[in-house]
Amino acid sequence: MLIGSDFSSYPKPGKPITAAICRIHGRKLVVKEIRRLVNFPSFALLLGIEGSWIAGIDFPFGQPERLIDDLNWARKWADYVRHVARMGKREFRRTIDTYRQGQPRGQKEHKREVDRRAKSISPMKVYGTPVGIMFCEGAPFLLSSQASVLPFLPNRDSKRVIVEAYPKLVATKVVGTNSYKTDSRQKVNAAQKAIRTEIVAAIIDKSPSSKLRRLYGFRVECGEALQQSCIDDTSGDMLDAVLCALQAAWAWSQRDNNYGIPKYANTLEGWIADPALLEDA
């Protein structure tokens, strides 16, 4: 089994954690269903599924090394995640706010090495797109899952593997920086819907010369109803879950090569599973 998940730091019916449940058949990534998890216990149950699987989940699994050192946090991922879990969301946000106030302009939110390469926002961000809060809420679930969380916590005894995903990297390869989603589920944007349609067409493209198929090694297969749901979902969460699954599938295909983890990806900050982030990319 393979899972792709778009994470929410405050899951609820209007903004659930979205999970694409998939299977790999040859070079096809078959999407069986897309689940909407409206609370954290449901997410914990997902990570507790027995059997062999790999999951790609969209939130930063780690924090920048500079922040960790400046705050005198433990230099082991499991230890500083436990520390953040004890802090809780409110204290974590206060800690980050206080730290930012003491930093010079332009250096208030540090980035991990992989963020610089992926052009993703700082995992310290606790407002706007609060990926820092996603880390605070989500990382403890990864730690308690007993899965192999790469590259932080390899667990050779576990048949379950979790990698960090970033679906925007996949979408960018198709539509560049064009926006394909909005925070409002009710506000229909015809241009964004057309862009989501283009992305869906690219991931299901059966042509051997398909750009995404050549990059990731797989094409996506799913029923017309699921395809249309990904197109109609203005939030982009359903589509993002499928794109996360595609990144997880690529990592799975690289399992004999340490899941594609490059040398620059240390066990303090982490890494995002995507062929564009290999060392020579």
Image (spheres, rainbow, N blue to C red):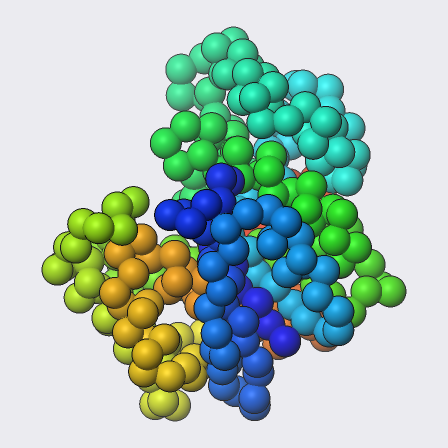
Q: Position of residue 22 (x, y in %)?
A: 54, 76
Q: Quadrant of residue 113?
A: top right
Q: Which residue is at 42% across, 83% downward?
A: 221
Classify residue 153 as left or right of residue 126: right
Compared with 142, 176 (above or below) is: below
Q: Position of residue 83 (x, y in %)?
A: 74, 28
Q: Which residue is at 48% across, 10% downward?
A: 101
Q: Which residue is at 20% across, 63% downward?
A: 193
Q: Position of residue 109 (x, y in %)?
A: 48, 26
Observer-nearest of 205 and 2: 2
Count of picture labels: 0
Compared with 10, 211 (above or below) is: below
Q: Position of residue 140 (x, y in %)?
A: 69, 41
Residue lying at the far left in this picture: please name it: 190
Observer-nearest of 245 and 20: 20
Residue 68 seen in this snapshot: no
Residue lying at the far right in this picture: please name it: 157
Give the position of the N terminus as an image quadrant. bottom right
Observer-nearest of 79 and 86: 86
Classify residue 241 as left or right of residue 26: left
Q: Which residue is at 53% across, 33% downward?
A: 133
Compared with 269, 165 (above or below) is: below
